Image (cartoon, helix red, strand yellow):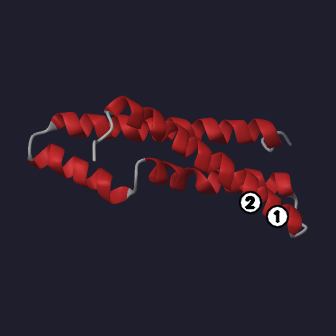
Amino acid sequence: MKEIGFFPTFIESYFIALGVLLGGSLIGGIASFLTGQPPLTAVARLSSALRIWAIVAAIGGTFDAVYSFERGIFNAETKDVFKQILLILSALGGAQTGALLINWLTQEYLS
């Protein structure tokens, strides 16, 4: 099986984090509506709670990241460490974009 390149993985990491955050928050809002709780408040709360899980899902779990750092440090492959840091930053950007969209949608920061 052919491994995909770095740039497509970089873009996928961003959009996976964005999708996990938006999808989880909005579907959780539907669930809170069905149970009689305020949906916009639940969406905003879930958005902040799902942020770290969106990043972990986007980078493919924690063990792959740790293995890449180990290989980069112990085998002197700094290119892998740099790539992994960029993938984590991409996932952070996707999660931040999703949180910003949720804040715009719910306007929970306004009181």
Spatial separation of the CA atoms under disc 2 and disc 1: 6 Å
At mark 2, the secondary structure is helix
Residue 25 placed where, x, y %? 70, 53
Examine the rendered structure and indicate whether residue 31 appears above or below residue 108: below
Residue 9 placed where, x, y %? 39, 37
Which residue extends farthest top? Answer: 7
The residue type indicated by label 1 comes to Ser
Q: What residue did someone put label 2 on?
A: 28
Tell me which residue sits at (49%, 48%) in the image. Answer: 55
The reply to whether dot 2 and dot 1 touch (C-beta < 8 Å) is: yes
Q: Is residue 71 left or right of residue 2?
A: left
Examine the rendered structure and indicate whether residue 67 appears above or below residue 89: below
Q: Is residue 88 left or right of residue 54?
A: left
Residue 26 placed where, x, y %? 74, 52
Which residue is more in the foreground, 5 or 89?
A: 5
Q: What residue did someone put label 1 on?
A: 32
Binning the other alpha carbons within 10 Å of mark 1 as few (below 14), some (14 to 19) or many (20 upward) gives: some
Q: Is residue 9 left or right of residue 38?
A: left
Which residue is more in the foreground, 29 or 99?
A: 29
Quarter occupied by residue 111: top right
Tell me which residue sits at (42%, 36%) in the image. Answer: 89
Which residue extends farthest bottom? Answer: 35
Tell me which residue sits at (64%, 40%) in the image. Answer: 98
